[in-house]
Image (cartoon, rainbow, N blue to C red):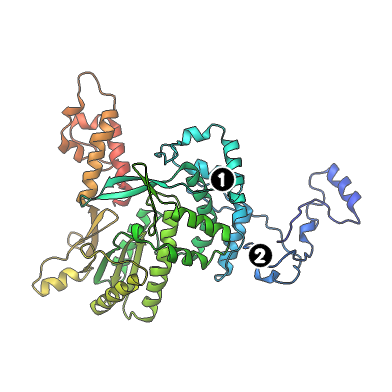
Amino acid sequence: MHENRETSGASRSNQDRDRLAKAQSHNANMHAPEESDCAVVPMNQPNKGEQSSAEVGEGRARTKENIVPSNTSPTQSGERVSQGLSGVRQAAKERKQERFTALLHHASVGLLRDSFYALKRQAAPGVDGMTWKEYETGLEDRIADLHSRVHRGAYQAQPSRRVYIPKADGRQRPLGIAALEDKIVQQAVVTILNQIYEVDFKGFSYGFRPGRNPHQALDALAVGIQRKRVNWVLDADIRGFFDNLSHEWAIKFVEHRVADPRILRLIQKWLKAGISEDGQWSESKVGTPQGAVVSPLLANVYLHYVFDLWVEAWRKKVAKGDVIVVRYADDLVVGFENRAEAERFLKEFRERLAKFGLELHAEKTRLIEFGQFAERNRKRRGEAKPETFTFLGFTHYCGKRRGGPYRLLFARSRHSRSRGYSRIRTSVIPSLRWPPWEEPTSLPAASIARCRSCSQRCSSQQSARPAAVLRAAASWSWAGAQR
């Protein structure tokens, strides 16, 4: 690895003169060449992610200074990354086939500290019982010890604590709550790997990525359906994706870009840590816990190779008509111009998933006629109105402006609305401070249901009175996506 000693000696022959000038003025010799600008002979083989291909086996010519500060965001908190991580991102962008062999050294004490502050303060504790507030006491000593264990190889991942939350169909969704130190290390590793994979991921992938959100996925889908010749829509759902993700394939996919054995061992530790439920430990042979910090990134990497690269090649080589794709984690929508291509794609997609231990949900996966000409075509055939589909909590249906052309319409799904109103009744209303002459039970449910965005006012004076009810309803309902 090249060493960059940024000392302020313009030249050894004029060193005394330079020191005198700098003592007299802060700006003296500010444009003089630094030691790091001179030709450098490589100290070892080019197995570092920061090195460029021009440095392989030979010296380095005089280089330009990088005076532009890095604006790369490592976490969702928006903190800036180090110049080293910025170099990893640049190398990943320039060399698409590069395998990074030295990444763990970027997991510094500072990055671990930033990763701790990026975690949710009120998150439930894992098997260690450690809360965020408790860990903050003596944080510097704790972070230094964790940093030492990670780099010495003494760090051991703890099993995830199993909890369940209800699903829309009445079943229970299993979640895995990681221990606090596991969350910190996972957040740091995700920050490092994001510098590589954010360059690789496709533009139609929106789930759990820095700077991307469900609103953008919904906007992209709306624009694609309205501006492209979309007549058929495939609303696909992968059955139990997080629970059936293959560990072997996940590691193979990561190894396409990461060759640092220490990073790979950390990922394997998290995958093999197991689950603790009611004090009983069970081994995890497949799947990654929903709720772990590293799980969304592993899911995106997995589907990047299983779906994204494949569908992009299929669209270019097989499809004759227009094809649009929007994916948010394991929830995806594909639009087609031709029915024959849509049916062929669905058949080949099932075969593709089967190779990697996955399958489509038979009841939730549907191929429907949808688009600006769907209603007219179905009416000509004497059929009913086009079916609807739900994506990211919004039901999409074909409509038209009053006396105008086709328009894609969408509204919050029934299940999404019921969850929002239930949250208001059970969490928001009991926490409000009510006047002595008013009781929370006096609020009519129909009036609460009308609190759908911050721009609306309820007609009932009682329910409009506490502004917190309106704010809570608006913040939960993605009011910004409703136009």
Q: How many marks?
A: 2
Q: Is residue 77 visible?
A: no
Q: Is residue 248 above or below residue 283?
A: below
Using the image as rendered, state which of residue 440 and residue 17 is in the foreground: 440
| Residue ID for mark 2 | 51
Residue 450 is marked as none
Q: Position of residue 277 (x, y in %)?
A: 34, 45
**Going 68% across and 57% down the picture, which residue do you hit?**
66
**Going 63% across and 55% down the picture, which residue do you hit?**
84
Q: Is residue 39 above or below residue 144?
A: below
Mark 1 crowd level (few <14, some 14–19, many ≥20, 10 Å Cα)? many
Q: Position of residue 263 (x, y in %)?
A: 55, 57
| Residue ID for mark 1 | 112
Quadrant position of residue 68: bottom right
Q: Is residue 54 above or below residue 163?
A: below
Q: Position of residue 456 (x, y in %)?
A: 25, 40
